[in-house]
Image (cartoon, helix red, strand yellow):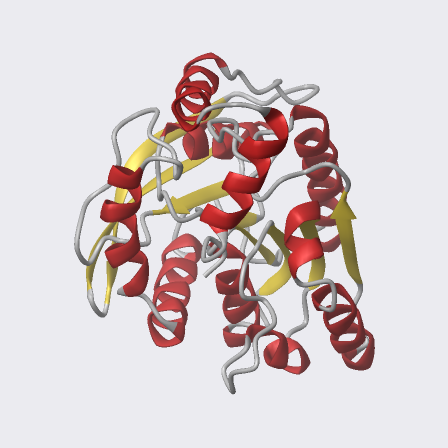
Amino acid sequence: MCDQHYEDDLNEYLLKSGMSRRRFAALGVAIGLMAALPRAANALDVHESDVEVSTPDGVADCYFVHPASGAHAGVLIWPDALGLRPAFRRMARRLAESGFAVLVVNPYYRRMRAPVIPDGATFADQATRDIVMPLYQSLNAQTHVTDAKAFVAWLDRQAAVDRTRKLGTMGYCMGGPITMRTAAALPDRVGAAASFHGGGLVTDQPDSPHLLVPQMKAHYLIAIAENDDQREPQVKQVLRDAFARAGLPAEIEVYAGAMHGWCPPDSAAYNEAQAEKAWGRLLLVFQKALA
């Protein structure tokens, strides 16, 4: 899991910064309350709704937002380990304002409706980890693919989605490897994908996501946290080699000074400058590959 080393990294960060764990958790709450993402330039008016998507395993509660008129390229967002919550709704709305029809899913729908954590909770809280870890462990490569197919099929039935255009998918933390399984399971639909501080993209297991690259047809953006790279410096080159052998375009970059979890605006590790850089690169990839 992308957070398997969270405690070690957090303790090292707190030691260097001189910040207490309580202060770190409080900072996460403050950020979640105050963070306001910039609106897209020439932002479109959007329509948003809570929706329910049927899957082979039940009914998933999700959030769907899209421009108020017309049909647009669809995008499927896989949240991080804390699941569907207000921060991801804000990010999805921002993407819709740039001209995409966006579905954010609750990956834990089999067990709980979203949100699964209280507003402002962070992974620094033991109580939060006690809730999230069993939910995370209930998922696997098979459920990722089953869900991906159901969510993409749902998007393709929506009037706001232009089926003549490829779909995009993006994921954070645990969502990173799910984007790879989505792109490999639906290569003729997924034209672009992005992983932000994704964990477990390269493992020594036979179901490692990087082994699926030959099955993909997607243009990829992989944004890596500096401390994740320090822990596993070989991952970026393994990924670069895999995409190069498959002949697929891939932008794979380590974001200097960014700690794992730096992209969601409610994260205590949020790094606004680097999150904005990653968002800008995402828009360029999507606008090019999903045209």
Q: Position of residue 135 (x, y in %)?
A: 26, 56
- Quarter of the image for residue 123 reads top left
Q: Position of residue 271 (x, y in %)?
A: 64, 29
The answer to whether residue 268 is above or below residue 202 is above
Q: Residue visible at 30% across and 54% down?
A: 133
Q: Residue furthest top?
A: 34
Q: Position of residue 50 (x, y in %)?
A: 28, 35
Q: Is residue 71 visible?
A: no
**Total label count?**
0
**Is 220 positioned to the left or the right of 100 in the image?**
right
Q: Is residue 127 visible?
A: yes
**Is 254 positioned to the left or the right of 171 in the image?**
right
The answer to whether residue 191 is above or below residue 256 is below
**Is 287 positioned to the left or the right of 186 in the image?**
right
Of residues 227 and 42, the one nearer the viewer is: 227
| Quadrant that contains the N terminus | bottom left
Q: Residue visible at 35% across and 24% down?
A: 120
Q: Residue visible at 66% across and 76% down?
A: 213
Of residues 162 and 12, the one nearer the viewer is: 12
The answer to whether residue 124 is above or below residue 78 is above
Q: Residue visible at 70% across and 55% down?
A: 229
Q: Position of residue 27 (x, y in %)?
A: 46, 19
